[in-house]
Image: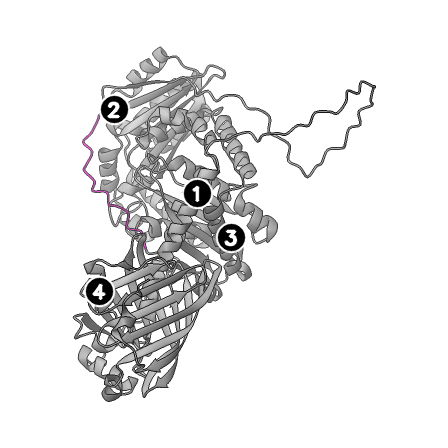
Amino acid sequence: MTTNTTSTAMYRIALIALSFVMVLSFDAGAQTSKKKSTKKGKKSATTQAPSAIDESPKTEKLDPPDLNVRPNALPGTAFQFPDYKEFTLSNGLHVYLIENHEQPTLTFSLAVRGGDAYDPTGKEGTAAIAGDMLSKGTKNRTAQKIADALDGVGASISVSTAGESMNINASFLKRHTNTVLSIMSEQLREPTFDQQELAKLKQQYQASVQSRRSRPMEIASALSRKVIYGMDNPLARRTSKETIEAVTREDVVAFHSNYIRPNSSSIAIVGDITEKEARDLLKKYFTSWEKGTRPEVDFPKMTTEPAGVYFVPRKGSVQSTIVVSAVGPAVSSPDYDATDVMVSYVGGGFGSMLFNTLRETYSYTYSPFSTLTRGRRYNRIALGSEVRTAVTDSAIMVIYRELRKLAGEGPEEEALQRRIATEVGQYQIAFERAGTVAAVLQNAWMNDVSIDHVINYTSRIQALGEGDIQEAASRYLNMFNLRLIVVGSPDVRSKLEQFGPIKDFTLDLEPAVAAALEPVNLSAQQLVDKYIEALGGRAAVDAITNVVVKGTVEMKMQGRDMNGTFERTVAVPNKEMLVLDLGMMKQAQWINGSSAWVSMMNGPAGEQSKDESAKLILEARIFPFATIITDGYTVTVKGKRDGMILVETTSPFGRADRYYIDEATMLVSRLEKDEQTQQGLLTTTEKYEEFTTVAGVKMPSITRVQNSIYSMTMRATYTVNAPITDAHFTPPTK
């Protein structure tokens, strides 16, 4: 921080305070979990004995039913997972078999570890094209002959790709088994990848790429993947006209050879078939499918973007598409079930939390949603809705408020039990469909999850209580873990600033490119000298030995107002005292030039580690930018844009800051800081306004601090060269 003698320390103490708020939130959740059962229990009923026995006949009068009261759910039957058999063929193809002789139908569902995530860089779309090309001709059949043969028996073979998987599904009457499987087998073993068919398919894909600009939800979902997984993560890459055009026949052939192999696949067979029949069919049609050597793929870790707002302007939009995203637990995590139910509770259709607020209470939208992915490596939570442009910020505020309430207070018991009953019921009903059974088995195989884990799903979620859901919300939907994606009219952008720093993207999800920086013919030292002169001159600056800053603080944290006061004293060269009082949250900090202490919630002052003290001592400056070179920062003058000179600095401890100096006044107008917190990278912006002259030196009366977690407005008054002793900078003794 620069001319503002308050904001650097306020920024640091706010981080401490916010961390403590989060601790309190988690502790509250834990305390609540102790009070709220993690298992369902029946409420005790109190009965009163009659004072006398009355055996006189009575005519029972029945009250009309109250149509506003939801009836109790009928007792359900215990879920019974279908019996299955599991084995592996000699070529490595893993097989699941479930017999169901109620209907003369069969489903053969093949899962291949070879989806979009394995597309070559710069040739995104290869996997999807390779999958679709399987139906475009084989060694013995043209594309037309395949279509005619399947139509003739009323069967279908569909292919889909997503993430790390490719799924090939065939459904048909049993009597047509040989016809369908002969085609499916040929598609897997002997596709021709006809050049003309490939050209036509690429044209179709390019037309689809062009049309997705008109689908805001698809844009928002794609950006959500980029923000959570990483901008260049294989699970977040998108096709474009250029990448599709770059895909050659050789690429498609190579993809098929590398990934569409039996030893990278499993097949689920469900329907009117015996084990002997299944083994005979597999031997006839699939054992000749040759295994291959799968290339080693260095799959990257998630590189989640900092919390904040990610905005895509779309001219002419009358609605805003809102997607709040967060990192979710792995499928193998013990948190997954509770998080899955929690996400469903938040926005899983009728009766969900967001349905009741966004739709029923405020009429902001018709269909809010929430999802949790079920990926092999890592997962993403996404929730939100499409709302009218005029209520964009109001809808976001409601979403944040409801999430904060869920994390702090937990779910409503009755609503949670209805949600669990709904999940169980839908799960059981889904298993009446052969395709669902096959998909569940395939998902387990794809995600390296045991079938027992799948079988026990309903019993696990039925054991969940309010405390479990609250804990999941506190952990995964806390303010540090939320990323806000909005696609909408450019007019809505200014309303989003209250939710954190905004990063702009094009409709093609490329970062919006700012105007090029113009060169600045000033060295870092010359720029610092001009800054000092703009403050009031070297003599006036050097005459100040200490500054006492007092003022008010208005903090907003996802819709919650926290107002109070602050007092900060800074003395040369590197001493500081700060008190931040937000009512229930009072924090203090002392730096005496060699050590630092922090007190939270009026607790005892804790001395900081040597490394942390060194960081705080370095920043205990009245005018930090004036000494930034002598303090050992790396300083680079990048250039100027829109009347602002951009200066990038790196502290001796590695923190990156970006100063924006007003070319007209040569005062620091804005500062952006990248702070690595326990919850991830946090970018904070400070803006300085309404400079006043104190003892011949300009200082800002208003400082606005903002990040994705909170916003603060500080209004300050200054006293210069007050009679202060060194005792002022050490914690008081009790």
Q: Residue furthest front?
A: 734
Q: Mark 4 to mark 1: distance in Å? A: 35 Å
At which x and y percent is residue 239?
Answer: 33, 49
Q: Is residue 595 left or right of residue 220?
A: left
Magenta segment, which residues? 289-305
Label 4 sits on a secondary structure element that is loop
Label 1 sits on a secondary structure element that is helix
Q: Is residue 75 left or right of residue 86?
A: right
Q: Which residue is mark 1?
A: 31
Q: Residue at x 39, y 52 (%)?
A: 22
Q: Which residue is mark 3?
A: 386
Q: Mark 3 to mark 1: distance in Å? A: 36 Å
Residue 240 showing in the rendered view = no
Name the residue type under label 3: Glu
CA neighbours of label 1 inside 10 A, class few (<14), some (14 to 19), many (20+): few
At which x and y percent is residue 299?
Answer: 23, 42
Name the residue type under label 2: Trp
Residue 428 lies, with reference to residue 206, above or below; the image says above
CA neighbours of label 3 inside 10 A, class few (<14), some (14 to 19), many (20+): many
Q: Which residue is mark 4?
A: 595
Whether tag 3 and tag 2 are in contact, CB under 8 A, the answer is no
Q: Quadrant of the N terminus?
A: bottom left
Q: Which residue is mark 2?
A: 289
- In terms of sequence position, does the residue under pointer 3 or pointer 4 come before the other? 3
CA neighbours of label 2 inside 10 A, class few (<14), some (14 to 19), many (20+): many
